[in-house]
């Protein structure tokens, strides 16, 4: 795992934080959650741009968005009590499977 994979992990973490605080911002009417959201997206896009120096755009975006979807959905369930039904869980399982296939078997994943 190289530095660009670390950049991608930071980008994912910042995006998940920003998206999680987006709900708490209540339409950008609450200052602190709104600032966390804006800062998180800024950090996320900056580190995603660094990632793209070595990892193809489509691959990086698939990993970034796929892991982000699963983590944000998990946070929504744990923090906000949002329900995840069987089809939602199955879909997220397929997303995770896709990310694993890209990382384990793709020669274009920046390895």
Image (cartoon, rainbow, N blue to C red):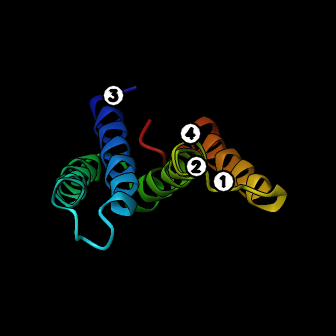
- Image quadrant for the C terminus? top left
Residue 6 image position (x, y, % from top left): 32, 32
Q: Label 4 to label 2, Cα distance in Å?
A: 16 Å
- Image quadrant for the N terminus? top left
Q: Residue at x 24, y 57 (%)?
A: 45
Residue 2: which disc?
A: 3
As drawn, 1 above or below 65:
above
Marks 3 and 1: CB-CB under 8 Å? no
Q: Label 3 to label 4, Cα distance in Å?
A: 13 Å
Residue 95: which disc?
A: 1
Secondary structure of residue under mark 1: helix
Q: Label 3 to label 1, Cα distance in Å?
A: 23 Å
Q: Earlier in the sequence, mark 4 or mark 2?
A: 2
Apparent side of residue 18 relative to residue 32 in the rendered image (left or right): right
Residue 103: which disc?
A: 4
Is 105 or 15 nearer to us in this picture? 15
Q: Label 3 to label 2, Cα distance in Å?
A: 23 Å
Residue 70: which disc?
A: 2
Residue 109 image position (x, y, % from top left): 48, 45
Circle count: 4
Q: Earlier in the sequence, mark 2 or mark 1?
A: 2
Apparent side of residue 49 relative to residue 111 in the rendered image (left or right): left
Q: Residue at x 33, y 68 (%)?
A: 26
**Nearer mark to the viewer, of 4 and 2:** 2
Other-residue count near label 1 (Cα within 10 Å), few / some / many at <14 / 14–19 / ≥20: some
As drawn, 9 above or below 92:
above
Secondary structure of residue under mark 4: helix
Marks 2 and 1: CB-CB under 8 Å? yes
Q: Label 2 to label 1, Cα distance in Å?
A: 8 Å
Question: Residue reaching furthest bottom?
Answer: 27
């Amino acid at each position: 795992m190289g530095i660009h994979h670390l950049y991608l992990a930071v980008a994912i973490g910042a995006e998940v934080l920003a998206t999680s605080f987006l709900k708490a911002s209540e339409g950008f009417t609450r200052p602190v959650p709104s600032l966390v959201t804006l800062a998180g997206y800024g950090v996320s896009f900056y580190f995603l741009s660094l990632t793209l120096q070595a990892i193809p755009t489509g691959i990086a975006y698939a990993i970034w968005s796929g892991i982000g979807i699963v983590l944000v959905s998990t946070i929504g369930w744990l923090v906000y009590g949002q329900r995840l039904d069987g089809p939602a869980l199955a879909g997220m399982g397929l997303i995770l499977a896709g990310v694993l296939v890209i990382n384990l078997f793709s020669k274009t994943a920046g390895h």
